[in-house]
Amino acid sequence: MPRDLMYQDETHPPMLNELTKKLFSQGYSRENHPEYVYWNDWQNLGYKWDYLLALVWETPCGLMIDGKSGKGRFIAISDTYHNGIWYCPENDNPAITCPLRKTDCSHRIPFGKNIIQCPVKQTIKPYDYENSIERLEKEHIAKAYEQWMEITGGSYCACIVGNNGYNGGYYQVKYDVMNCIRYGMNGCKNEFCVIRKKPRDLTKVNIYYDIRRTHITKQGLIEDKRVELTKGVKVFDHPIFLTDAEIWLKYYRAEKMTFNAKKNPDDRRMQFFSKNHRSWPGYDYFEFHYEVENFRIEKKAGRDLMQDLQDAAEGIEIRHNHDDLKAAKEQKRERRAKAKKARVEKIKKRIIDTGYHNMKDFEQRRVHKLLTDEEFEDCILAYVNQDKKLEQVSNDRVQMVLFGADSEVRI
């Protein structure tokens, strides 16, 4: 329920539920009311939890609901506002999902096409399990389990999804090899595919491809074409199973699906200027092509030296993605080492200048995190020696002043 309809102010009085209206008309008030209700944050009287659990509810078609059951507890917290109607226990019309999935029911609340809910009411009839929603739900769970076992044989499968009960079923098969690859951290580990009814090869592999970048430039009468081939780019960041890789590659080749290759910022920038402007700083004409090719399955990225030499002889600049990643990793390691060294030198200078005992708590924690015991002791020693030097200088100055004063007196 929208809060602006609930809280009272001068221009918008609170919307009272039917329970509150009924008790107010009988002379009760916010402070004086029966024991089974309380004044809630919605500026209304509401049923207490124990009272709600003791109730029995009935659907418009005669099905009963026990207040202590899971469905009854859901009714107890039900609170929905739609098309000017407030559906809640205090209005004696809480909404529940229809267990019969009747899309053409005249009692259905018009929430939406795929949402089949109806309002229920309190009843003084004794609870009848045989004519209850609880019995229907238990049967529903049993049928769903039976269907699950029929499809999977008891094995978990990432391609058995959801509950399409609104269409008359319980589970449905949505086979997609990406479900198998994405499941968990390492993919589906079933040795037998319950959907395809075939064994799976769980050998760890990856799918690799090459990126061909073609630069065509022109400056005056001089035209140049440069081709760069980056080999061994991974499709997946982690290894996948061989069967999944074969299915993925077969589907990719058959369906010609769009593959989002790993473009760097320069690739995207060059593609934009090539498509929209045909120009690039320093050139009269610029054209850039980005193509992926040579998809293959391998345990790890291999190198074909003869092919590399042949490509190089044709004027193609050869690069291996593994080398680029290794170089980038080494550069990152060097940057981190340099930054750590700078932090160490800074904290050492801080100790020597101010002393460890004068540092704040977070600085002292940083000291023990960055420095070894030997480095820490050296810094403390340097600070102590510096204090001694300053003390000696101070004493010398005092003696000079006294000596000067004494000589002045003698004069």
Image (cartoon, grey):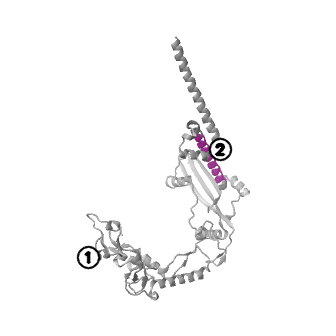
Q: Which residues are magenta?
A: 323-347
Q: Tag 1: residue type?
A: Ser
Q: Is residue 127 left or right of residue 313?
A: left
Distance (Cα) linking label 2 and label 1? 80 Å
Q: Residue 57: x and y, percent?
A: 40, 82
Q: Which residue is mark 1?
A: 25
The quadrant where residue 34 appears? bottom left
Determine if residue 205 is in view. yes
Q: Which residue is mark 2?
A: 373
Q: Residue at x 62, y 57 (%)?
A: 212
- The verdict on residue 329 being magenta is yes
Quick check: 326 above or below 403? below
The quadrant where residue 177 appears? bottom right
Residue toward you, 275 or 371: 371
Mark 1 secondary-structure assignment: helix
Residue toward you, 232 or 30: 30
- The verdict on residue 215 being magenta is no
Residue toward you, 241 or 267: 241
Q: Residue 160: x and y, percent?
A: 56, 76
Q: Residue 267: x and y, percent?
A: 56, 54
Q: Tag 2: residue type?
A: Asp
